[in-house]
Amino acid sequence: MSWNTFGRVLRMTTWGESHGPALGAVVDGCPPGLSLAETDIQPFLDARKPGQNKFTTQRQEADLVRILSGTFAGEDGGSRTTGTPISLMIENTDQRSKDYSEIAQTYRPGHADYAYDAKYGLRDYRGGGRSSARETAARVAAGAVARLVIPEVSILAYVAEIGGDAIDPAQFDAAEIGNNPFWCPDAAAAMRWEALVDDARKAGSSLGAVVECVATGVPAGWGAPIYAKLDADLAAAMMGINAVKGVEIGDGFGAARLTGEQNADPMRAGAEGPQFAANHAGGIAGGISTGQPVVCRVAFKPTSSILTPVDSITRGGENTQVRTKGRHDPCVGIRGTPVVEAMMALVLADHKLLHRAQCG
Amino acid sequence: MSWNTFGRVLRMTTWGESHGPALGAVVDGCPPGLSLAETDIQPFLDARKPGQNKFTTQRQEADLVRILSGTFAGEDGGSRTTGTPISLMIENTDQRSKDYSEIAQTYRPGHADYAYDAKYGLRDYRGGGRSSARETAARVAAGAVARLVIPEVSILAYVAEIGGDAIDPAQFDAAEIGNNPFWCPDAAAAMRWEALVDDARKAGSSLGAVVECVATGVPAGWGAPIYAKLDADLAAAMMGINAVKGVEIGDGFGAARLTGEQNADPMRAGAEGPQFAANHAGGIAGGISTGQPVVCRVAFKPTSSILTPVDSITRGGENTQVRTKGRHDPCVGIRGTPVVEAMMALVLADHKLLHRAQCG
Amino acid sequence: MSWNTFGRVLRMTTWGESHGPALGAVVDGCPPGLSLAETDIQPFLDARKPGQNKFTTQRQEADLVRILSGTFAGEDGGSRTTGTPISLMIENTDQRSKDYSEIAQTYRPGHADYAYDAKYGLRDYRGGGRSSARETAARVAAGAVARLVIPEVSILAYVAEIGGDAIDPAQFDAAEIGNNPFWCPDAAAAMRWEALVDDARKAGSSLGAVVECVATGVPAGWGAPIYAKLDADLAAAMMGINAVKGVEIGDGFGAARLTGEQNADPMRAGAEGPQFAANHAGGIAGGISTGQPVVCRVAFKPTSSILTPVDSITRGGENTQVRTKGRHDPCVGIRGTPVVEAMMALVLADHKLLHRAQCG
Amino acid sequence: MSWNTFGRVLRMTTWGESHGPALGAVVDGCPPGLSLAETDIQPFLDARKPGQNKFTTQRQEADLVRILSGTFAGEDGGSRTTGTPISLMIENTDQRSKDYSEIAQTYRPGHADYAYDAKYGLRDYRGGGRSSARETAARVAAGAVARLVIPEVSILAYVAEIGGDAIDPAQFDAAEIGNNPFWCPDAAAAMRWEALVDDARKAGSSLGAVVECVATGVPAGWGAPIYAKLDADLAAAMMGINAVKGVEIGDGFGAARLTGEQNADPMRAGAEGPQFAANHAGGIAGGISTGQPVVCRVAFKPTSSILTPVDSITRGGENTQVRTKGRHDPCVGIRGTPVVEAMMALVLADHKLLHRAQCG
């Protein structure tokens, strides 16, 4: 069945279609008394929103969020969470009027069109409906609330690779991330990607990407064995983002090529808990945080919407070909970066509360 | 908090420690009327059980499963599921008596020792307690029940890579998988691994591995957007297995290096639904199965238990070093293979029932 | 923590405060392809809405529902559910501007004011905030969707008792229920209640009520032992309605005064399953429906808002007295009747899908 | 589907049939570090166990509990919870060998026989299988663990009424409860019941009962609006006990017959929070505890197993009659009393942890 709620005790339920009147998220279980206003959420939506440069879809959406419930101006006049569900709504404003008859009758390869029809027997085909990456706006809004639950944690995501061209870790500079349209921490790579992505865009092609996300400040002890492990929940959170096909924690697949000696994360006594000489584990052991940075890597496939005709079939079962004209992201991983951050925040905030429930 | 239940409508709750009297799983939500006896489960436990050759830990466990509830010999005398919870119990028999004082006071790097202590303030240190891979016996038992729920599906997992040495896909032969102690479908690779793993074993070292799992026969339409996507649930299922650090669906990280044209899975009209010219997507689009084989890859890190001393600390916060003597798997990915199959079965069976709930 | 989601596979998540901009429900897990438009929901909201006569609060709310997601006009032009979350929103229009300083600082006895403050440390005191019965509008809207999932079932609720004055079962006439402002199936009782409730209203007093609800057409087999029994889920559903203090299934507390012989529900063979000579059990045995009408009774306390001063305390811990002026229901059970129906629909629809998941 | 897990963050999953080899409960989410051994659980099972006097079934069960996981003898040698799942097992020893052919083919009216068959298509008919009250032994064992989570709370349940004969509240003496086989706090009533129940027993008849349960020491603030209200969760917990048909919180149905003035619970300032002049609300307002005693009343129907023949049908749809010979409780409410206490403990412990998760 449909299952549009994420989280265990801090939970978001999202709703909305790409071309419906609005989309939104209901965030339930948020601790009371946190300072929360729309201005705490809007910057994250602005970071994700489309149409900001030529490297993302040209759809224009203001993506203005409204808080419809769950906050109250207390005695000091400041808007605070009350502990009741926080309803966030974003109106869709640029559902460009167009003829949907082709997409209504044809399955776009790589998209969810056929799968939705096979499951539900009908689908809202306008812009991909519920399967559109537009849904991730609701996640970003909810993620902004989750961040307030974990002020001790800093979350940073960035694009580490586009089209197989990776950053040089030696050139990593967090300050660069906001200086280019790619969330790229390596200035030289950003320059290369400019040409790479622009070429793909002009050719009506698309590129995949790898996004890395690092959360620092996570204390040891978050995570819930056996089936709510912190890494397992992160894996689900990331794999559930549109276009994601792979998730790694720490060294990930690289660890499968190491020996036990190479993969060890030696510990030394430190003033505030252990000091680790390495972080192959990505900050998680046995599903529980170790106090090291929590590190994950997320693989985004290239957008399936391309100008080159691809063989496909119609709803009626006839052979056809599909070319995708119109507004699309040449590299969806770029705009996925704020979504990765949001999912990291939601998982960590949930696990903070889970840990508190059991262990006080 | 602790969260030892997996699944949404077909659920298993597992319990038990490495060196406690027993471990088990309660499988709830199983359809009634399925033929189920201990002999349906035992072969899968036998495939996973330790001590079968020199490439796995020498712990000797019979791993005999007992069904304590949820089945009944009906009118025809055959044991059938009744729809009530199926309690499966496996007694531990080889909890070798030994001195645990060292492990009690020292954190083994790469293991969950420190994380458990940080979370709970105490831990059952005997053999890793709850964080031991011994818990996966319960998953394998539950997975055998899940298989009965999805007779239309065939699940096959195999080791595709050990210590960076991969199989040759051109030499893939499913019939080879049972012919060697590595679940290896490539006879030549199996011969190479024999030396590779044996060298690691003699050196007290360990190796990582990549396991692939393919499920054929999954009809189009299973999966539950947005936050119970089939691939997201698979990612959680696999990442939650002990020692797993990465999960890919279809081309996974490889897809991030493809163009949209390369990554396309073209469709042609077929007699029984669409025919796909490729399966980069691994059988899942928009979180819903497409009717193609469901394919995932799972990265296992090398076992953290090695003979080489590694820097560590004691519970009291003193520097020390840890060498792991005793019985251990030189490559835990090998014995992880039946566990991967079990988790695939549990996810698919759950989603079959979920789909039926909503879509009839 | 806050837990604003109801249901297991067909789930509603509600949000909103009495005096916020809007309230709503997200209905997830609804089967696809059902014909659903706002006109399918509005009549139920109209039945519940305030200000319709002098026996209910004089707050004026249009209670117009908007469907923001989850439906789509298919090929035949009719609006149908797509299987994705259905977001329902009702704007608040009559949050009468007033001075809240008194209620902000004083705990109204019998209301949730003190409990919310004790839990959360702050509360939205305007009209009771989240604890207001206004939230039940969202349930009624969601319940209207649930009804579409169970077309085989007819649900009828009515007021059986007000202020201790009960209907005469011998005078039960379902056609009378809509003929009076009390949902009363006994014309003579309705006439008596007119005076009874009006007297209470004029005196600034309030009265309790008992609501009965009967669902016919429920097939045998719905319900999920052991901890998701149909009667247990109904009990939770009803007890969670504002002002409810008791729930009975079938004979309820009366059954505690019967002997086994008196309480028996004898069966005879019938053309379509068993015929029952009585229904003391209220249609449920072992938590599973038997095919008889599902019957429950729900006790509503008198509204706590009364004109008579009651001892209370301030937020600061000073003694005070509270008199409740303003708009209130003299008998909240009356307007609770459509809410009882809605909760019955939600529970039954959920269990229909649950049953289908496990038993096909 | 089957749903054999109870609770939200402190959860028990129970399994087992009346005449299977064993039954049990897995308690998950328990805080670590609590002192727990079998001796903490056994007294509660002893209180519930059958065959202790002529007023309960003569089935003889030792009901010895074993802890199979989740505890560990720490450094001080004391057995403590580790935060991992606690597996509790009770072996069935008196599954008296008998001929089940009659019960296999006939539906006992008032029992779940027909409903289970209608749902599942088959059933374990030996002693009622999963629908037997024997399952409640697992709840009592799990409830004993839950009590350790809430040491600040005292829970007391007692029988307030049998066969319509109620205790005199003026004669309430908690010390009397253990002095008679009826958990009766009124010595005079206990004497009357002796004759009443014995007469029913000799006649092969049965009687209903009302059990009251009071929890003192519950702080203000536990409970989770809107759909996890403390009273709603209690209602589900109690209604789900075998043979229960009604649940009241505080004045319950009596409140429906009061005016707002009569039902008020006035507050006065006290040294440690408010003092209440009455407790009509049963310690819960808006679904959240107020700091007053939490009070509920539970109606048990008379046991359906009686000697008088009752009309029924066979599996094959033929008319027949059923007389229940053999071992049965003449008043199942008596042995239900420890079960009511256990469910109260489970709900309160769960809500303590839930509250801690959200509100710290």
Image: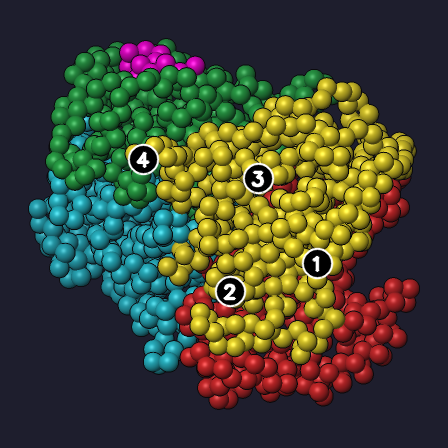
Chain colours: A cyan, B green, C red, D yellow
Span highlighted in magenta in the image: B50-62
Is residue C71 among the parts visible in the rendering? no
Q: Residue at x 70, y 68 (%)?
A: D255
Secondary structure beneath dot 1 equals helix
Q: Check disc 4 and report the residue beneath it.
A: D76
Q: Are marks 2 and 3 on the same chain?
A: yes
Residue D191 point in image, percent of width and height: 77, 47
Is residue A41 among the parts visible in the rendering? yes
Q: Chain of mark 3?
A: D
Residue D291 badge? 2
Q: Residue at x 35, y 27 (%)?
A: B133
Residue D171 badge? 1
Question: Image quarter for residue A187?
Answer: bottom left
Q: Check disc 3 and report the residue beneath it.
A: D44
Query: What is the C-alpha distance between the residues marked 3 and 4?
Result: 26 Å
Secondary structure beneath dot 3 equals helix
Q: Are marks 2 and 4 on the same chain?
A: yes
Q: Are marks 2 and 1 on the same chain?
A: yes
Q: Chain of mark 4?
A: D
Q: Chain of mark 1?
A: D
The secondary structure making up most of the magenta span is loop
Query: What is the C-alpha distance between the residues marked 4 and 1?
Result: 46 Å
| A271 with respect to C300 (left or right) | left
Q: Is residue A320 above or below residue B217?
A: below
Secondary structure beneath dot 4 equals loop
Q: Amino acid at mark 4?
A: Asp
Q: Are marks 4 and 1 on the same chain?
A: yes
Q: Amino acid at mark 1?
A: Gln
Of marks 3 and 4, which one's residue comes earlier in the chain?
A: 3
Q: Nearer the viewer, mark 2 or mark 1?
A: 1
